[in-house]
Image (tube, rainbow, N blue to C red):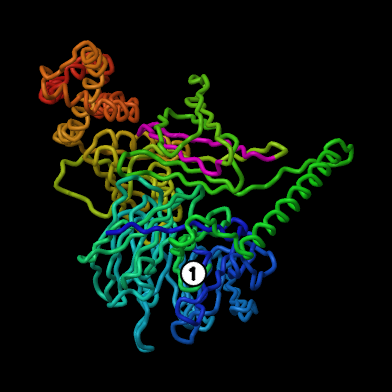
Amino acid sequence: MMELNLTRLDYLQVGVTSPKTMKLLSSGGKRSAQKIAIADHDGVLTCFGMKKQTSQVVFKTLPGSPISKLQLGGLDGPSQEKVFVASGAEVRGYTKKGKQFLGFDTNLTESIQSMYVNGADLFLCGNYIYNHYRDCKDENYFLSGDKITDVLCLPTRKNTDALVPILACEDRVLRVLQDSDLLYEVEVAGPPMVLALHGGNGGLSGEEVLYGTSDGKVGMIQLGRHSPNHKWEIPNEKRNGGVLALETFDITADGVPDVLIGRDDGLVEVYGFDEMDEPVHRFKQALSESITSVCGGCVNSSGYDEIIAATYAGWVVGFTTEPQQKEVGPTTTAAQEPISEEVQAKMENLRVEIDTLQQKVLQEREKYQLTAHSMSALSAIPQFAINDKFALNRDDASYTLSIEVQIPIDNVLLQSDVPIDLLDVDKNSAVVSYSACDIENGNFLLATYRCQANTTRLELKIRSIEGQYGTLQAYITPRIQPKTCQVRQYSIKPLSLHQRTHVFDESKPMNSLKLMGHFSFAEVHSWVCFCLPEVPDRTPAGEQVSFHFLSTFLDTQLDCQYKKGEAIFKSDNISTISILKDVLTKEATKRKINLNISYDLNEDSVVHTLNLIHPKLEYQLLLAKKVQLIEGLKELQMHESDIGFFAPEYQKILDDAENLQAEYKKQPCHLERLYGMITDLYIDKFKFKGMNVKSKVPILLEVLDNYDLQNLVEFFEAA
């Protein structure tokens, strides 16, 4: 399949944008130039088109409170010409000429986070509440069990069809509704962040929905009236950023709508489809900021399709199929083609614009110098927006911290009161320097990332140790005067490497911990929320609740069931139960609540956990051994002209030397971490029996140095 060849064009810049705040207005004619509507955090809705390669604003609204979502709607058939924006708890509607025809204050307690318009139906969601309005009258309401990230409604063919709204929720679930009730829910590959109808109309069945997850996966699912059917999924093998924007548009002109993807690491991608209807990668382009919206259509020149992307800092960028270099025919090869009047005028305009900007900069500099030396002038702290994300990756059991600022970052200082490892990130060009820490006073990490010029986005990878919990703080200083800094805090939870799942295997050997006491449902929920990630802050509705978790590092399970006065935790890893017991006892003691604790341990679970650690430990020991051999083998290679006498395994080590060293460097402390887990498992096993075996840890480490699974199991059972 041929790769797409697209050329980048920059159109204009608005203020900072939220995801899903840009759309293309239909032009009436087929493949004639379209207008772009985009809304920003300044509360301004801008509609512009392109004329003679320059952007011309059609209308611009006055600034107000930040706009969180933008959707197109309209009652007259497929051409959706009305623009709807959500700001705070209000929805406003504008015609394509910029006249406001709707101002609807919903009086919702939460501000609107996601919105969808379908004819006379308006679907609005806050963090947990879904509301459906028809002709601005309240129709349906639903309280979700976890945070809602996006909302969509399947298209209705006839007026009599029942509406099928779909909510994307952070607990890795799509919830399909009917009126105010949950019809069914379906688990997807990761926490879904964005939804889109396949082909803009749900495909042939009208039920095909695309979803993009925060860990970078994209999938399609057919959501029937009664049951779901997973069609395909694009895995995120290259560990690209999370998906913020999804759209379908036939950019390859093969008659099949392609999938356009915008990611939070600045990547714009296009996937086409092969004969088997499986997605195939066709195009990618990296921008320096996260992509908040992506659309397909004709903007710059009629007849030439293009992809339009909007970035976090408000840039609108096009990738067009129009060739930018004119081909010179064989007759005029010798003579250089003269520059057209249009291009000359454009160059002249740019020169004038640059001169004006330079004058403006000089004036502002002089003004600043005057006020800096003035006795009466006050210094004000400049405000700047930060877009940050702290998310757990399933693939390598690490956290990704991404920090994005609308202006270039000067440096970021990281400080942590718990031991954490900083892992290498290929995309990161910042220079890191570590400072000495006062560990006795609870300061375990002090690292500074100095960014290169014009870096607006920084991505870091962090791995925490379960059982050690606290706070990671990031001090973000951008390149502005006067120097100012914002602090962001991220909590590292006791069981930080666990993620929510919706399946639980009862057949594994389980240990259980039971707590009884005079605590309320809200109190026990707040304790679970304190211990584990991906738990909703809001206390769930109902009398009792059950959550399942999976350890991303070891694949062990945890089941939490609790209600007022009682909580039961089951896990196939004793260390998980031990951490929960310690933390929950501490939290209850803080609130002066008396707990009655009982536990039931399964001896088989220890061997089961050791078997799960075994392949990881064996792989790391082998990797360390290979890396130690590389130097010696290279020395031999230098002295010997022919290394044919080397054993095949040594030749393979030499061939893979670079990859092996890179992998070893990428996973510092991996071996110590596995040793630490086995040591904790050993101590925890006997702690529940009331024995202190810390004195035997050195002997355990000797057993690990000459590692053999059978010997290790015997050591655990003999003690």
Q: Residue 111: in sight, yes or no? A: yes
* Foreground of the two, 412 or 520: 412
In percent of width and height, residue 39 lies at: 58, 65
Q: Is residue 704 found inside the magenta-colored segment of the image?
A: no
| Residue 534 horizontal side relative to residue 334, left or right | left
| Residue 703 horizontal side relative to residue 380, left or right | left
Q: Is residue 574 above or below residue 341?
A: above
Q: Residue 110: in sight, yes or no? A: no
Q: Which residues are magenta?
A: 455-480
In percent of width and height, residue 18 lies at: 53, 59
Residue pictured at 59% horizontal, 78% vertical? 96
Tally the numbered discs.
1
Question: Which SS type dominates the magenta stretch?
Answer: strand
Q: Is residue 469 found inside the magenta-colored segment of the image?
A: yes
Element under disc 1: strand
| Residue 242 horizontal side relative to residue 27, left or right | left
In percent of width and height, residue 285 lies at: 43, 52
Residue pictured at 61% horizontal, 58% vertical? 13
Q: Quadrant of the N terminus?
A: bottom left
Residue pictured at 47% horizontal, 60% vertical? 328
The residue indicated by pointer 1 is 115
Q: Quadrant of the C terminus?
A: top left
Name the amino acid type tagged 1.
Answer: Met
Instruction: Tell me where residue 262 sits by quadrant.
Output: bottom left
Q: Is residue 193 above or below residue 364?
A: below
| Local crowd size for mark 1, using a 10 Å CA cut-off: few (<14), some (14–19), many (≥20) | many
* Foreground of the two, 530 or 43: 43
* Foreground of the two, 390 or 522: 390
In percent of width and height, residue 382 lies at: 70, 45
Q: Is residue 523 above or below residue 587?
A: below
